[in-house]
Structure formats: C-alpha cells, structure tokens
Image (tube, grey):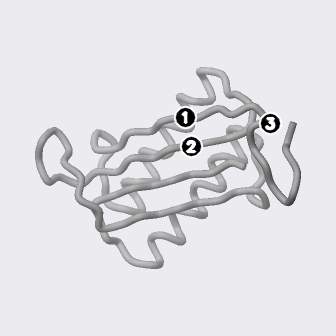
Amino acid sequence: MPYVHCLTNQDPGTRAEEDFKAGAAAILAEVAAKPENYLFVSVQTGQTLFVRGQREPGAMLEVSLVGSLDKAQKQEITARFCRLCQETLGVPGDGVYVVFHEVAGGNWGWNGRLFG
C-alpha cells in the first residue's frame, strides 16, 4: 500500500518507467504521507487505448491505498500525476484519467497480516 497501476498506449522505454515510479513515489510521500517502502507500481505500456475515440496518447491511473484522502489531496495528486505523465510518458494531462480506490485496512493484507 499504496498501489499505482498505470495503463498507457505509449511505449516510452525502461528509463521513463523508472522515472514514472520515482515520481509516483515522491507524489504519494509528499501529498498523502505514504512511504515508498510500501509502494507497488505497475506500468503497462503499449496498450490499445482510445482517447476521445481516437488513437491519441493516453494513460489510465488507478491509485489504491489503505485509508482515505480528502478532496484537496486527491486534487493535488491528480494534478501532479497528470504532469508526471506528460514529463515521463509523453501523455498530455487531458489524456490522463486518475481513479482513487480507498480501502479499509481490514481489506488489505501484506506480509501475512492485515493492515487494520
């Protein structure tokens, strides 16, 4: 926890994926106080995505985490993830969707135990 899943139709290469992971870690640490030592990131590149019905650069991000964030935190994370996608994956902000999944600690397990 947290888990960031990024699905994109871009294929930016391994270095860009590493940069995306580092950026995601920094965003979640700074805005949501979620440390990188628990972070999982999945990046699926080269996927078929239609943005506004066209083959335009796009990315779908799902941010799953134990607990909840307030609206201001979600807004800040969304803005920063959109910039991160532009900088690392070449996807403009209007081609990025961010979905938050807030999970109760009793529904998330790790290392043989639940968080709540």
Query: Amino acid type of disc 3?
Result: Gly
Viewer-nearest of labels 3 and 1? 3
Q: Which mark is residue 100?
A: 1
Q: Are marks 2 and 1 in contact (CB under 8 Å)?
A: yes
Left or right relative to 16: residue 47:
left
In the rendered structure, which amino acid carries the disc numbered 1? Phe
Q: Residue at x 39, y 56 (%)?
A: 7
Residue 53 relative to residue 78: left or right: left
Indicate the position of residue 27 as horizontal and vertical percent values.
62, 48
Q: Earlier in the sequence, mark 2 or mark 1?
A: 2
Amino acid marked by disc 2: Val
Crowding around mark 2 (Cα neighbors within 10 Å: few <14, some 14 to 19, many 20+) is many
Residue at 34% x, 43% y is 93
Q: Position of residue 80 (x, y in %)?
A: 51, 43
Mark 3 residue element: helix
First of labels 3, 2 by sequence position: 2
* Marks 3 and 1 in Cβ contact (< 8 Å): no
Distance between the alpha carbons at the discs numbered 3 and 2? 15 Å
Instruction: Tell me the residue at 59%/21% (across/down).
Output: 71
**Cα separation between marks 2 and 1:** 5 Å
Mark 1, secondary structure of its residue: strand
- According to the picture, the residue beneath numbered tag 2 turns out to be 63
Label 2 SS: strand
Question: Within 10 angstroms of label 3, few (less than 14), some, or many (20 or more) residues?
Answer: some
**Closest to the observer, 3 or 26:** 3
Q: To which residue does mark 3 refer?
A: 105
